[in-house]
Amino acid sequence: MSFSFDQSREPTIHYDPLANRDIFLAPRRADRPNDLLNRPQEDCPFCRENAGLTPDPVQQWPAADSLDWKSRIIPNAYPVVEMKPSG
């Protein structure tokens, strides 16, 4: 069985009768690069040396002004849902 998604559509919630729960269908997430590719260390956006390849962190530990960070939270380039300004 194959599925075709309209990539321009916003994420929607659907009921999955097999799992007996609601699920998100987020067509634009199909644009993500292959998660299983082996990348050379120099191209890895998650390596400390390549922090400039990622968006600015939403949060970082230790504090954001520290260059010796241990953990960072960065925006997802392919989010399931997005917050839009109201109004």
Image (spheres, rainbow, N blue to C red):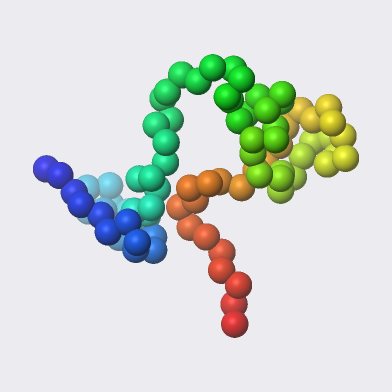
Q: Is residue 78 left or right of residue 69?
A: left
Residue extending furthest left?
Answer: 1
> Which residue sits at x=54%, y=17%?
40
Residue 24 position by quadrant: bottom left
Closest to the observer, 13 or 77: 77
Residue 13 lies, in percent from the top left, at 35, 61
2 vs 12: above or below: above
- Residue 54: name its quadrant: top right
Q: Position of residue 31 (x, y in %)?
A: 38, 45
Q: Give residue 83's position: percent from left, percent from top.
A: 56, 64
Lateral position of residue 12 relative to residue 81, left or right: left
**Is residue 2 among the parts visible in the rendering?**
yes
Residue 22 appears in the rendering: no
Residue 52 shown left or right of residue 20 in the figure: right
Q: Residue at x 39, y 31 (%)?
A: 34
Which residue is rendered at x = 46% and y = 19% of the image? Answer: 38
Total marks drawn? 0
The quadrant of the picture occupied by the N terminus is top left
Please state which of residues 52 and 80 is positioned toward the viewer in this rendering: 52
Quadrant assignment for the C terminus = bottom right
Q: Position of residue 73 (x, y in %)?
A: 67, 41
Q: Residue at x 83, y 27 (%)?
A: 68
- Is 31 drawn above or below residue 69 in the view shown? below
Q: In terms of image quadrants, where is residue 69?
A: top right
